[in-house]
Image (spheres, coloured by chain):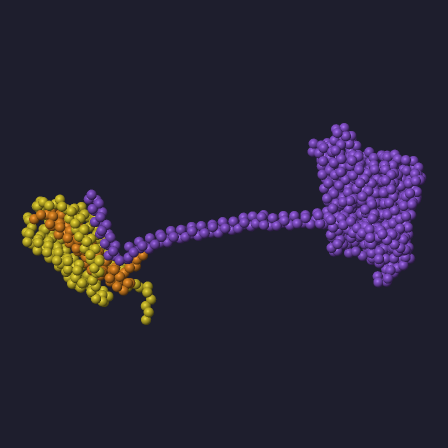
Chain colours: A purple, B orange, C yellow
């Protein structure tokens, strides 16, 4: 049904962006509140749509875009269950983070511009999830990428931040190229880019026996998703993106933008054939496990959380690969809350102590009780403690994995153990234990201001309880929302039990590593262990590999092209210029020749005149002589 | 006595006058040569009268004499004026028309 | 009536020799006097040719007035003549050739008259001359008087000293 006012959902933050861009300086402190208000207003609209969406109604606004022979070129916004869920995530978590940023970015000279970018990001993210047509989706996709770049390199005075922004943009661009090709292929073969018609397209293709084409298209779309959601091999930008301000990491690189890839796959799931789903599963699983191992070795708070995000996204992709779209979206939903909360907590610590390295932190529970509390809640939720939101979503994924293959379940349990291990390692090292040597004045740290703590508390509530919408206790309304039926009834106790065991194992590991300082491995395995540890700590040398095998050759090729351009093309242009110069020189010589001819002619005439002038001697006798001779001559002639 | 010899005399006198005009550097010398030429013309007129009986010829000879007088007057006035201006009486030294 | 050849040739010789002196004598005064001889010789010829009035007019006007005038002019401009100057040789040569050529041309024009001198029907008398002057030739007659006036005015204008020049004392 047509509901034109849904257009306000992305428009309000967009207007905030425009206002802040032009008048942000003048507004000053109010910029943050303006941005938050715009987003909150959007959120209000979203929540206002809840009843209609819950009844299963789809709300849309459409307007014709390009009718180049294609009458179906209609672009619009659509709010169905899936997009509504994403809208809730973006507006709710986004508002919290925006308010938090007002405190976090208080001393920044470019305060208002930060919120302008933030608003633009929210507007484009909202547009992305509401897009009805792939072209609109792609436009918002790129816009989101742009905002990510702007925000990562917000402190562009730091060369690391500028480089990180560039890296993020280029890496996601690579994925976006695949996405574009996939969209073009789809447009060319199916002739239709309306997202509502995907199921019909799938049917048609399968009927025509063009399943391979479907696989190809879906894999290309996966490229774009893998880029945005930082799956292997396009994951390299996410850890570096931590150079940006922590609220940015929280919003964009934990809760929303990286979820866009998952959303895309979820939306286009009809286009995925079993073969491409296997690829999705493989990539997701690989990312989940490898990122988990790296997170265990990292020493920077934000890096740990970044790899954690990678790992969780891999988990979501795994769920999608198993075909469990609702499970994946549910996990995305809950992950947004607890991951954002983890980042905000980390931000709180960084804001208070100006430290990011674990070695310089410790025992902050005494000084920052609220931060410690919310951090604990988020950590427990992520690890999957029973009845917290993370538990419900992860449990569903484990169930789906167990249904598919037992080995898959085991792998995911290992991943769960790693998850709780690294997050609790972070918690223990940061908040418990003794304060580090007072080389760094972290014992001067204090709790963050209310403007930062209140949003965190709000998110903590979400991290704890929001998972209930997908739990059997409330009848799993989430599934009905997403248009799917719940795959099972009740709770599978074996899965619950094994996940709780994994959780406990992880916490025990973290405790041991953080406080016991006991060697875990037997002596014989220690060298191997050390080597594996180093491998993980060096992030599997992926960045180095890329640099050596991709970037350097590319740069050398561009240098060669540059040399070509300089020598050949510039040379040709210079030669042309020189030719012109030579031509003009030649012309000058010709001109001089002509001059000489003309002068010579004049001189000749003058010479002739001078030569003949001697006749005019002025002596009368001469004239008379000439007269007489003329008379003689004339008379002779007459006589003839 | 052949008639032509009479005419030849006037021819010769005229040519001597021309010669004098061409040779004499002095302006008055040139004037004298002009008088010779005029006389030759008058003589010629009279000869014609005598040979063929044209009576106007004598009148013309009279006219010639009268005109010779005018011409001599004007010519001498010019010579005197020129001598004042150019400080010389030699016509070949006055080259104002040169060029 | 025929002309005696001796008289004719005598006068002719006088005329030619004197004319030669006129054009060749370096001393201008002597050249002028030679001109007088030429004029007298021509007058003599006029008498031989039965043009007595003309002979008289010749002597009166030419010798008496014109020659006198010329001599006066010679005297007036004598101080400007430092020494008798002769013409350059080249000029003499080309002048001689030119005048000789002219003579040849003139002579060839009247070659047809190689026959003997015809006898005039009757001599021209003074009354007929006078009558000619006032009837047939009255126009030239009057014009000549105009020419006289012009000549006199012109001569005076030319020869008079210029009055506008401020006298510097």
Considering every residue shown, the one lying at the far bottom of the view is: C169
Q: Which residue is pictured at 45% across the width and 52% down the height?
A: A589
Pick whichever, A518 or B43, lies toward us.
Answer: A518
Residue C12: give x, y in percent of width and height: 10, 54
Q: Quadrant of residue A328?
A: top right
Q: Which residue is pictured at 80% across the width and 47% down the height?
A: A252
Relative to A459, is A137 on the left or the right? left
Relative to A221, is C76 on the left or the right? left
Q: Which residue is pictured at 32% across the width and 68% down the height?
A: C167
Picture layout, residue B77 above or below residue C142: below
Residue C36: give x, y in percent of width and height: 14, 59
Residue B81: give x, y in percent of width and height: 26, 61
Residue B94 seen by the camera: yes
Q: Quadrant of residue A208?
A: top right
Q: Which residue is pictured at 90% across the width and 53% down the height?
A: A511
Pick whichever, A40 or A502, lies toward us.
Answer: A502
Considering every residue shown, the one lying at the far top of the view is: A207
């Amino acid at each position: 049904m047509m509901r034109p006012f849904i257009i306000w959902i992305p428009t309000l933050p967009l207007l905030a962006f425009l206002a802040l861009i032009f008048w942000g300086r003048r507004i000053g402190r109010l910029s943050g509140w303006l941005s938050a208000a715009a987003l909150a207003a959007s959120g209000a609209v979203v929540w206002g749509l809840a009843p209609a969406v819950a009844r299963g109604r789809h709300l849309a606004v459409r307007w014709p875009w390009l009718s180049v022979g294609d009458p179906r070129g209609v672009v619009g916004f659509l709010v169905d269950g899936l997009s509504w869920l994403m809208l809730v995530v973006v507006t709710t978590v986004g508002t919290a983070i925006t308010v938090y940023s007002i405190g976090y970015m208080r001393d920044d000279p470019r305060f208002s511009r930060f919120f302008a970018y933030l608003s633009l990001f929210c507007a484009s993210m909202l547009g992305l999830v509401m897009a009805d047509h792939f072209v609109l989706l792609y436009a918002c996709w790129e816009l989101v990428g742009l905002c990510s770049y702007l925000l990562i390199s917000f402190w562009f005075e730091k060369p690391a931040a500028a480089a990180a922004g560039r890296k993020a943009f280029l890496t996601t661009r690579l994925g976006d190229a695949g996405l574009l090709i996939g969209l073009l292929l789809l447009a060319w073969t199916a002739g239709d880019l309306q997202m509502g018609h995907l199921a019909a397209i799938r049917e048609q293709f399968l009927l025509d026996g063009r399943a391979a084409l479907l696989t190809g298209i879906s894999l290309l779309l996966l490229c774009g998703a893998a880029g945005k959601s930082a799956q292997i091999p396009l994951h390299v930008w996410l850890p570096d993106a931590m150079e940006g301000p922590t609220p940015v990491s929280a919003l964009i690189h934990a809760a929303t933008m990286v979820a866009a890839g998952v959303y895309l796959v979820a939306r286009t799931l009809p286009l995925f054939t079993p073969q491409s789903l296997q690829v999705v599963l493989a990539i997701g699983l690989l990312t989940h496990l490898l990122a988990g191992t790296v997170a265990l070795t990292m020493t920077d708070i934000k890096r740990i959380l970044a790899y954690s995000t990678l790992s969780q996204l891999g988990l979501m992709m795994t769920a999608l690969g198993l075909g469990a779209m609702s499970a994946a979206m549910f996990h995305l939903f809950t992950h947004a809350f607890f991951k954002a909360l983890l980042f905000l907590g980390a931000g709180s610590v960084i804001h208070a102590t100006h430290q990011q390295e674990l070695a310089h932190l410790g025992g902050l529970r005494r000084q920052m009780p609220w931060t410690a509390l919310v951090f604990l809640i988020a950590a427990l939720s992520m690890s999957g403690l029973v009845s917290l939101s993370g538990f419900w979503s992860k449990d569903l994924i484990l169930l789906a994995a167990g249904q598919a293959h037992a080995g898959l379940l085991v792998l995911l349990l290992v991943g769960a153990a790693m998850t709780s291990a690294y997050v609790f390692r972070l918690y223990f090292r940061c908040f418990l234990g003794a304060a580090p040597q007072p080389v760094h004045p972290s014992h001067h740290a204090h709790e963050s201001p209310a403007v930062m703590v209140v949003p965190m508390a709000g998110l903590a509530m979400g991290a704890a309880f929001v998972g209930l919408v997908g739990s059997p206790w409330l009848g799993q309304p989430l599934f009905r929302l997403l248009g799917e039926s719940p795959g099972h009834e009740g709770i599978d106790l074996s899965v619950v039990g094994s996940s709780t065991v994994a959780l406990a194992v992880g916490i025990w590991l973290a405790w041991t590593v953080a406080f016991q300082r006991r060697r875990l491995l037997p002596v014989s395995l220690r060298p191997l262990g050390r080597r594996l540890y180093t491998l993980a700590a060096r992030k599997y040398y992926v960045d180095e590999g890329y640099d050596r095998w991709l970037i350097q050759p590319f740069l050398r090729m561009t240098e060669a092209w540059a040399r070509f351009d300089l020598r050949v093309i510039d040379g040709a242009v210079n030669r042309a210029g020189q030719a012109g110069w030579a031509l003009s020189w030649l012309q000058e010589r010709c001109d001089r020749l002509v001059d000489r001819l003309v002068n010579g002619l004049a001189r000749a005439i003058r010479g002739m005149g001078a030569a003949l002038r001697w006749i005019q001697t002025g002596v009368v006798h001469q004239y008379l002589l000439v007269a007489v001779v003329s008379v003689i001559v004339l008379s002779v002639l007459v006589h003839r | 006595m052949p008639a032509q010899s009479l005419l030849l005399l006037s021819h010769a006198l005229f040519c001597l006058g021309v010669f004098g005009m061409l040779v004499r550097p002095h302006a008055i010398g040139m004037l004298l040569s002009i008088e010779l030429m005029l006389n030759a013309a008058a003589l010629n007129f009279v000869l014609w009268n005598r040979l063929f009986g044209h009576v106007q010829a004598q009148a013309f000879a009279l006219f010639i004499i009268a005109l010779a007088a005018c011409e001599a007057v004007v010519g001498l006035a010019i010579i005197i004026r020129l001598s004042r201006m150019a400080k010389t009486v030699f016509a070949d030294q006055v080259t104002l028309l040169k060029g | 009536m025929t002309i005696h050849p001796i008289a004719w040739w005598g006068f002719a010789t006088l005329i030619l020799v004197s004319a030669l002196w006129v054009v060749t004598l370096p001393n201008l005064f002597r050249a002028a006097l030679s001109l007088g001889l030429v004029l007298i010789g021509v007058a003599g010829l006029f008498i031989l040719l039965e043009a007595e009035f003309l002979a008289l007019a010749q002597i009166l006007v030419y010798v008496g007035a014109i020659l006198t005038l010329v001599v006066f002019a010679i005297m007036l401009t004598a101080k400007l003549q430092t020494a008798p100057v002769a013409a350059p040789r080249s000029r003499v040569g080309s002048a001689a050739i030119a005048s000789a050529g002219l003579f040849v041309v003139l002579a060839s024009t009247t070659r047809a008259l190689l026959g003997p001198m015809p006898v005039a029907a009757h001599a021209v008398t003074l009354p007929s001359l006078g009558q000619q002057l006032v009837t047939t030739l009255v126009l030239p007659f009057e014009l000549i008087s105009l020419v006289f006036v012009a000549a006199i005015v012109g001569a005076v204008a030319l020869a008079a000293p210029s009055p506008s020049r401020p006298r510097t004392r």
